[in-house]
Image (spheres, rainbow, N blue to C red):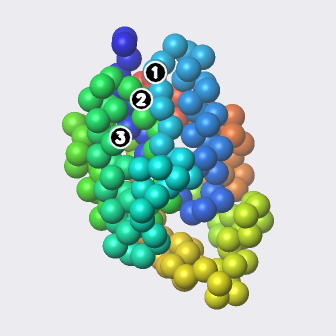
């Protein structure tokens, strides 16, 4: 395929910009002639993981399955972009361990809780704050920020084009 297969793992709170970034990065890489696929929380939850809820155990299994699928895609030569909250370091570390060195790129899509709530078109934060949604990351379930992601994006003040440029620079230089 004349490309370096990789898993670009986007992690961050709901509303931080992971899906928007994943979609734009996918388009950008396609235009550059790369073979890319996006695994996003929404598309995976409607198919592969439709049998899972949001309990801590189900959330771990959700990430485990996604990591295994991403590994298969990288084995097939694709660049796979994974856009999941993936709130726990242990789960992200599990995913990283499935890949060869240099194949897994953790991208912390960082935005303040206030910014994420402002961007929330589905009303999930308000629902969680009212008690109608249990185990919602950032409100009544923790998010463990990455200790040393390969890329740290701050979507509160960095534009989408700046974020894309930072990822592309990283990909092009490694």
Give the secondary structure at mark 3: helix
Q: Are marks 3 and 1 in contact (CB under 8 Å)?
A: no
Mark in front: 2 vs 3? 3
> Does 122 sit above or below residue 32?
below
Distance of label 2 from label 3 (alpha carbons):
9 Å
Q: Residues within 10 Å of mark 3 (few under 14, many from 20)?
A: many
Residue in the picture at 60% in, 47% down: 19
Contact (CB < 8 A) between labels 1 and 2?
yes
State whether residue 137 is above or below residue 171: below
Of the two numbered discs 2 and 3 on the same chain, state the one appearing first in sequence: 3
Q: Which label is found at residue 75? A: none
Q: Which residue is mark 2?
A: 79
Task: Please state if 118 lies on the left or on the right of 79 as rendered.
Answer: right
The image quarter containing residue 8 is top left
In three-dimensional space, the C-alpha distance between marks 1 and 2, rounded to whole angstroms, equals: 6 Å
Query: Horizontal and vertical percent for residue 40?
Result: 52, 47
Do the residues under discs 2 and 3 have CB atoms within 8 angstroms? Answer: no
Q: Position of residue 104 (x, y in %)?
A: 33, 40
Pointer 1 residue? 35
Give the labeled residue for mark 3.
Answer: 70
Tell me the element at label 2. strand
Image quarter in which the C terminus is found: top left
Residue 35 is at least partly visible in this image: yes
Residue sitting at 61 percent across and 80 percent down?
Answer: 133
Can residue 170 be seen at all in this image of the molecule? no
Position in image of residue 67 (x %, y %): 33, 48
Q: Dot 1: few (<14), some (14–19), or many (≥20) neighbours within 10 Å?
A: some
Residue 62 vertical placement versus 25 (above, below): below
Quarter placement of the N terminus: top left
Residue at the extreme bottom: 131
């Amino acid at each position: 395929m004349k490309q370096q297969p990789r898993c670009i793992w986007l992690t961050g709170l709901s509303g931080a910009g992971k899906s928007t970034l994943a979609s734009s990065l996918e388009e950008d890489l396609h235009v550059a002639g790369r073979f890319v696929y996006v695994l996003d929380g929404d598309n995976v939850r409607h198919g592969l993981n439709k049998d899972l809820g949001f309990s801590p155990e189900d959330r771990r299994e959700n990430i485990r399955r996604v990591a295994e699928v991403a590994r298969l895609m990288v084995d097939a030569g694709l660049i796979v972009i994974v856009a999941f909250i993936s709130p726990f370091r242990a789960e992200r570390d599990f995913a990283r361990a499935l890949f060869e060195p240099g194949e897994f790129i953790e991208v912390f899509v960082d935005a303040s809780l206030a910014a994420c709530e402002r961007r929330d078109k589905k009303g999930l934060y308000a629902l969680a704050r009212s008690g109608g949604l249990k185990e919602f990351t950032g409100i009544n379930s923790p998010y463990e920020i990455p200790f040393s992601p390969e890329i740290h994006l701050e979507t509160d003040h960095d534009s989408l084009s700046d974020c894309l440029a930072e990822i592309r620079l990283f990909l092009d230089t490694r």
